[in-house]
Amino acid sequence: MPVPKKILVVDNHPLILELISSFLEKEGHEVRVAQDGLSALDVLEGFVPDIMFIDLVMPNISGDKLCRIVRSMPHLHGVFVVILSAIVSEGEKDFLSYGADACIAKGSFKNIFLHVQELIADSDRRGAREWEPRILGLEGICQREITKELLSSQRHLELVLDHMSEGVVRFTREQKIIYVNASAIALFGQPEEKLLGVSFFGLFDEPYASAVRLLGEAVSPQPAQAGEDEKILFGEKRLLLNFLSIPEDESGTVLALVCDITKRKENELREREYGEQLSRLVEERTLSLTQANQQLHKEIAERTKVEKSLSRAHKRLLTVLDSLDAVIYVVNMANYELLFMNRHAREVFGEGIGRICWTVIQCGQDGPCAFCSNEEVLAALKSAKGGQGSVYVWEHQNTVNGYWYEHHDRAINWMGEVRAKLSIATDITERKNDATLEREARELLEQRVSERTMELEKIHRQLLHAGKLSAVGKLAASIAHEFNNPICGIRNVLDGLKRRAILGGEDLQMVGLALRECERIARLTKDLQSFNRPTTGKEMQVDVHAALEDILLLCRKNLKNKNISLVKEFAPSLPMVQAVEDQLKQVFLNLLTNAEEAITAETGVISVRTALRQGYVAVQFQDSGQGIVPENKERIFEPFFSTKSAAKGTGLGLSVSYGIVTRHGGTIEVESTPGIGSAFTVLLPVEGRA
């Protein structure tokens, strides 16, 4: 016994509805019926079926469109949809493109019932891999030529309607939309599945909805129009609506032709304003004319009226034929003859109908263009399911005017059996220019990002260097602490030996040398400890100028003996800095000593400058010495690195100085040119370290 299903049967034939529903109910299924697509949508508002049997040819929304609407509803994705129609045998009907899962060709009721039972049993296998959509019931059914001709006529009619510039909307007596063409879909900005079945008047906002509803309800055998004089707005578009009743249509459906007349009304307003201004000028002139001129004015007014009438009629015709501001042409794909050119195409390329396309639309060609899209268009036609080819889109810079165009090409049948190509080309020159500007801006941005990355890498190297010095400082202080205790013991033993023992000659000299070396090691360990921590740790407000004067006083005589001139360029006033004074003096002494030792010539100059720089006190020591070679510049702050001999330096002076300055929240900048000299600048924060 099969599991009962919820089934919806949609067919405009009452007998078929009655027989199929009775058959299914006897099989134990829950059945709902609808006589057309619109009624089916009403049923689906409160009923979610497992299976739907849908006829293709129905009034008020056909079966193929109903299938697409069902497939667009998320809550109906799982419905098993079956096409039940007699016309599947009359031509190529791709029921899969409608979203259906299977198809039954209408034949005898016995065969229909058998196929219905078979598909209900197979419906649960829809998602399985072995399920293959198919058409059942084609056996024993003959094609009817008249039906094929009617279907062909219907397709041609739908093609004509879809290529109309006006929107075509058909709705029922209950105001439900049952048909929209391509122009109406584009005008209302919603897909066909969303428009079908909704209220036509509900698309408009008040007060336009009420006005349109009154006009639509009052449609008689005579056409009714709205929007020509009064405003009917859809969003920002002004619409012209023409309502037509369909003769001999007992269902009372109404046909609405919808046209966007926004630009036309704007042009008419400008023309009316111009005409009113011209009329006022004519009237003013008329007052000053004689009786003879009055007759002339009458003739001019009549002629103006006729010209306006002709102008409006001419513009209406141009609006219908040349509504798109794009290059549109049709070319015979066999002999390349131009069959049609719209207004815009004629304005750009001149009159060309009857001529070869490459002699009109391109220049410098003596044969078909190398970039001709005919082959691609024919390939798209072969891959298309219906009678019209798929659209092939491509871009090209025209050789006549230099503009860039985006072409939408497709194969069509022109005036019977002529295979032609319809090309719609839109000017995209501005978009191409914008793309060039965007690329240049992107390249500039990438350059700036690269420069900024280099700056960040430089800062990163400085941070790594500072971290390395900090780690080495901690290690040096630890080693110095371990060395200091045994050195003190050795020095005490040697001092006691010198005072108590009777030494003479060479032994006494050896003990004295050992004591001096112990003192040197003690000073070295003291410098190592200073590399990691302040000597006092007591910070106070320090006058930088006073500290410099103390150091310069100590070094002045030594500099004078070496014929080195001292130049002071102090700022008029400097704020106090928060620092350990003896450590600050140690830094100044180290830098001044290095500047002195860098001068190896008979004479030299050392300049000491101070300044206030963006919240920092800057103290610069510049010498005219030999400078620092580039390969040594990156290592000058490393502990024990020195270009001097072992007797002259330990390589800790700059390391200790850099450690002191960084602990005070500052830094040391170095500028050096080999053979010219060096400049060391100490930067100390005015507000103290953060």
Image (spheres, rainbow, N blue to C red):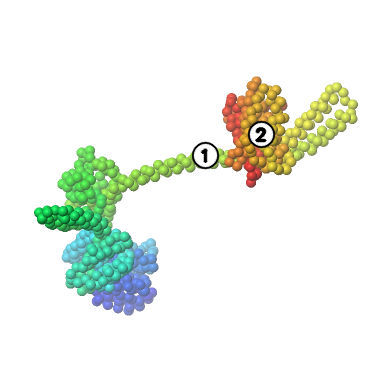
Q: Label 2 belongs to which residue?
A: 654
Q: Label 1 belongs to which residue?
A: 454
Q: Residue at x 31, y 47 (%)?
A: 428
x%, y% of residue 665?
Answer: 64, 42
Q: Residue at x 30, y 75 (%)?
A: 33
- Give the image quarter of residue 101: bottom left
- Give the image quarter of residue 202: bottom left
- Residue type of the residue flagged with mark 1: Met
Q: Residue at x 61, y 40 (%)?
A: 616
x%, y% of residue 398?
Answer: 27, 43
Q: Residue at x 79, y 31 (%)?
A: 518
Q: Residues within 10 Å of mark 1 (few under 14, many from 20)?
A: few
Please tell me whether mark 2 or mark 1 is closer to you in this view.
2
- Residue type of the residue flagged with mark 2: Leu
Residue placed most toward the observer, 485 or 432:
432
x%, y% of residue 17?
Answer: 27, 75
Q: Secondary structure at mark 1?
A: helix
| Mark positioned earlier in the residue sequence (2 or 1) | 1
